[in-house]
Amino acid sequence: MNKPHDFKPEELSASLDGALPPARDAQLREALEESPELALQLAALARVDDALRALAASELPDAVRNGMHERLRARIAAASPAGAGGRRSPSRLRRWRPVLLAGAAAAAGLAAVLMLPRLLHSPQPLPQDRVVQQVVPEPSGNQGASQAGGFAELVDDAAPGGLDEDWDTIEVLGLLEDMDGLEAVGSG
Amino acid sequence: MDVWVDHPVEDDVRLMLAFQEGDEAAFDALFGRWAGRLLHFLERMVRSRAVAEELVQETFLRVVRARERYTPTARFSTWLFTIAANTARNELRRPFRRGHHESIDEERDGAPLELAAPGPATDAVAHTRLLQGDVEAALEALPPRQRSALWLCAVEGMAYAEVAKALETSEKSVKALVHRARVALAKQIPGAQSGARPRRVAKARRGMAR
């Protein structure tokens, strides 16, 4: 038989929490029947729990609950446009990705259509000496010399693999120079 | 809604998993189930209704943020109260916190606590008429760790291991905290010293909750 003093106060508390080993709990039950003092001690602890549960038993007013819920919703909305539920909304870039991809594909297709004829009939890279010959005017004046310098710069910058627009510009300018020369010959 | 309704554990887990999948109604249901109990717990921790309401929101805000990481390895309530306890702990650590100020490490009475010798039996009705204010005052006099440990054990029916997880301490420490808190309250609540049949409510409640 277990006497009351065999039980530590912590064990009484643990018995209320269901944390006493079953064998020890059975011993406690026996002891409680034989010791009113031990029963009073346990009852005192149990009444503490009852008092606490009575505090928590008060019903939460709907107004309080709803108020908290509304404020929480506002905080969630402020933190994430997606709201509480749902996975995170795709970012703006992710949402527009299909449109961007379609646009990029269309642009690439248009560029291909525009560039294809040029690629098929691309002018032969002008030899350096020919270009210079085309663009350098007759050494007839200072003005022409200055222009020649400018054109020469274009030719130099138009390295292989450079922009086709540069080649076009050079050709047009060369034609203009030729026309000027023809006119000069005609007038002369 | 009655805050004392014990919900099946699997319902909470199911709702949380549904919320993970984007079901906002599930989140609202969880809030409806647990907001009141969290408020009671947090109010006792921070001793301010207004601050407790803010912390309830903060707790659920953290639930929203952590939903991707939730795994149903433990009871939902354990996970929820762990978050709530952390928010309360952070609040109590604030140097100029709203409302009361106290140290969470405050343990004013380091002497071993013993149960008061049972005095003359008082009228049993006295206990039922005990003002809630008296209990609140006695509870407030406890160090926060004792308060939270006792509340989670006695009111929420959590096991020592669950409370230890929520309070980031050991089971042994929880056992000591709960016992000391009970003894301290038993000394301060007159009705608690009246003789009565011991009841195993907590054990019964835990059985219901599981």
Image (cartoon, rainbow, N blue to C red):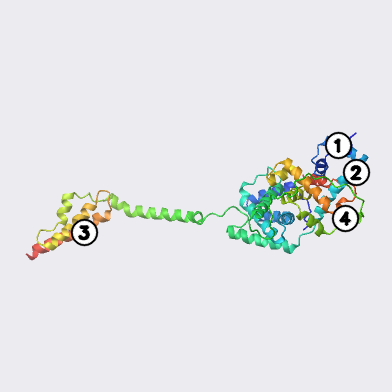
Task: Same chain for labels 3 and 2? Say yes or no.
Answer: yes
| Mark 1 surroundings: few (<14), some (14-19) or many (≥20) residues within 10 A | few
Residue A91 in sight here: yes
Tell which subunit mark 1 falls on.
Answer: A
Q: Say which element carries label 2.
A: helix
Residue B187 vs A9, above or below: the answer is below
| Mark 4 surroundings: few (<14), some (14-19) or many (≥20) residues within 10 A | some
Residue type, label 3: Val
Which residue is depicted at the point 48% across and 54% down?
A: A97
Residue type, label 1: Asp
Residue B209 in sight here: no
Residue in front for this viewpoint, B115 or B87: B115
Q: Which residue is mark 1?
A: A6
Q: Nearer the viewer, mark 2 or mark 4?
A: 2
Instruction: Name which of mark 3 and mark 2 comes first in the sequence.
Output: 2
Q: Say which element carries label 3.
A: helix
| Mark 2 surroundings: few (<14), some (14-19) or many (≥20) residues within 10 A | some
Q: CA distance from mark 1 to mark 2?
A: 13 Å
Q: Which residue is mark 4?
A: B127
Residue in front for this viewpoint, B86 or A147: B86
Instruction: Name which of mark 3 and mark 1 comes first in the sequence.
Output: 1
- Marks 3 & 1, CB-CB < 8 Å contact: no
The disc label shown at residue A172, or none: 3
Q: Say which element carries label 1.
A: helix
Tell which subunit mark 3 falls on.
Answer: A
